[in-house]
Amino acid sequence: MLKHEKIWLTVSSVMIIGFMIATGIQTFAFGMGPPSETERVDPQKVDEHEVFSEPGVYEVGENKYEVVMTLEIFSFNPGDIEIPAGSEVTFKMTSKDVTHGFQIAGTNVNAMVMPGYIQTITQTFDEPGEYLILCNEYCGSGHQLMATTITVV
Amino acid sequence: MALAQKIQEKTQKALGAHPADAKISKSYFSISFIALLVGGVLGLLQGLNRAGLLELPTWLNYYQVLTGHGLFLVLVFTSFFVVGYFYAALSHNLGGLQPKVRKMVWSAFWLKIMGAVTAVIPIIQGEASVMYTFYPPMAASPVFYIGLVLFVVGIWMAAFGAFIQVANWRKANKGQHLPILSYFATGVFVLLLFSSLFVAIEVFMILPWSLGWVDTINVMLSRTLFWAFGHTLVNIWYLTAVSAWYTIIPKVLGTRRFSDTLTRVVVMLLVILNIPGGFHHQIVDPGITESVKYLHVFMSLAIGFPSLMTAFAMFSIFERSGREKGAKGLFGFFKKLPWGDVRFLAPMIAMIAFIPAGAGGIVQTTNQLNQVVHNSLWVVGHFHLTLGMTVALTFFGVSYWLVPYVSGRVLTKRMNKLGVIQTWIWTIGMTLMSVAMHLVGLLGSPRRTSYSNYFGNETALGWDPYLIFLAVGGTLLIIAVVLQVYNMFHLMFRAPKGDSEFMVEPEAVGGNKTPFWTERWSRIIVLMLIVIAMGYVIPLTDFIFNAPPGSPPFKTW
């Protein structure tokens, strides 16, 4: 093996290990892991579910909100959400039909919402304004219309 | 034995490709480039629509076009090219194909065509707008899945044909190393076989469900099985491109290959580590714990290592070749490279494209960064760099000498020039398009979505200037596609007759002191299975034994 090759491969290994360490610290020390809720639900009985039978925005603490949301072709329920600036919002979601995506443009909120599974993701909204929520997993002929907004006032 | 082989090699050199084997490769290439044309036209339609310039009719909507585009380019164009290419190598390296193997690869040919046609019919009818990924519980017409089954069985036939060819050669040449390009071929077919097992299981779950024989399906299980296949597939096309970089580029440059041992170790690593890599498509999925997702960061990043080894090897070849031609200074070798030779230019640009493409891949495997770009147009930009540039341009570069070789014709100066022009148009088009896709993806524009400003939303309207480049890039690309297809059929049927050389460099730097453990395929496969088990046993058992009630089929288009 050439000397330069050894240097190159050492740098490569250090870089890859660096990425792994950074990912691990962010996930397990800073709680920045990807949305990974593991609770299950019967996808054909979402309307009878104790939580999802009543979708809506709930205040759960000081500046803390929970949005219980169902996704189905081609809408988010509830839509046109309004919350005060500075609040921490946890979205608790499931799908009533096919696989959907939940993305808020301009933030890092990005999660798959699948039938049979509950998904949660939390975001603090400091900047007032209107944010676009859209479905980013192809879900059918009206997929490009599946969108709503969250307004921070 | 060595003498007999020498005689065989000499006669083969004199005769060119075996006519029966040449016909196989020519047929595969023909289908491959027809698929490129069809897939390219569909791509243009999408680009124009996504830029807001073209409204597609209801009988051929965006999602039908997109499903077709993915299928024609990711499945048909690539897989037909790969079989044509590696079978040419097996025939050249291993003393011509055996009659039995020829029969197998012909049945593979017809099975794959039947499969593709069967799958495309329901797409045209609007009964299968489910994309290349066909995630349940979206359910296409059962005919679509039957087409996929035929296609996969075709791939298996081609894989087993290659295994038989290789096994017989090894029996007759005990103690010898498999010639390098056939070694790559073996790796590729091993990966194709094992990864397609996953999708085969998935499709056999889906078929009875889409026929209405069972009521519900396990959504997460099928999705996970898909990605064990879906991502490996694109890495197989990448490994095929890598084979050309290691073995063909040195020949074009007139120098020796990089270390034979290292080359074979790269193949082994890519075979062993590849399949669990697909899991990074599920980083923001529910139902999988953070620790399992973290384990998979390792699984995915590990694939980066052999690629970084390759980067070193390639630049080492360039530098040596340049210095042999009298280059001076640190970067003088760059000027000595044959930039006007399409057989070098196209794969060279392909390699350069892999620098940002590979870096983007590392971004996507890293959990938090993945969350920023998941399912946005960034991802589409990424795989147009990897597949659209790295893989496609390497395949094109190879085709400019391999197509004339199997056709008993030569690459003329004029055709070389057309090839250079074609390469540059393709490069400019693809670069404009994928850079715009990466940027607008970071802003949040989603993939797999027909043009939409989301009811006049301000954020979405801000994406429009970037999306114009999808139309500009798409237009340039279709020009390059038409030129490429013209060039290929010209080289196949019209170019002047003559003998071309099979451009593979047998000699490696450091000679042939390669240790023999690189030939122990059973050991490589066992290691691969261990890595697959590490990656998949925990999530798959969890999805099977802790499954929520299943989902009925939906047709949402």
Image: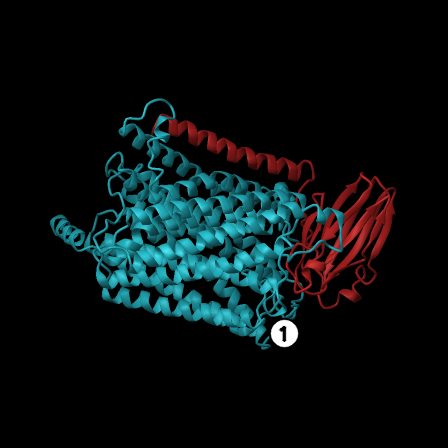
| In-image side of B442 versus A9 (left or right) | right
Residue at position x 47%, y 72% in the image:
B118
Residue A7 falls left or right of residue B459: left
In the figure, the red chain has which letter? Answer: A
Give the colour chain B carries in the figure. cyan
Q: How many labels, in total?
A: 1
- Tag 1, which secondary structure? loop
Crowding near the residue tagged with mark 1, few <14, some 14–19, many ≥20 C-alpha atoms within 10 Å: few
* Rendered location of residue B305, percent (x, y): 45, 39
The residue closer to the viewer here, B483 or B185, is: B483
Q: Looking at the picture, which amino acid does disc 1 mark?
A: Asp
Residue drawn at x 67%, y 49% is A36
Left or right: B33 as drawn, with respect to B259:
right
Quadrant for residue B106, please give it.
bottom left
Q: Residue furthest top?
A: B329
Question: What residue would you read off at disc 1?
Answer: B215
Q: Position of residue B135 (x, y in %)?
A: 59, 62
Can residue B292 be seen in this snapshot?
A: no
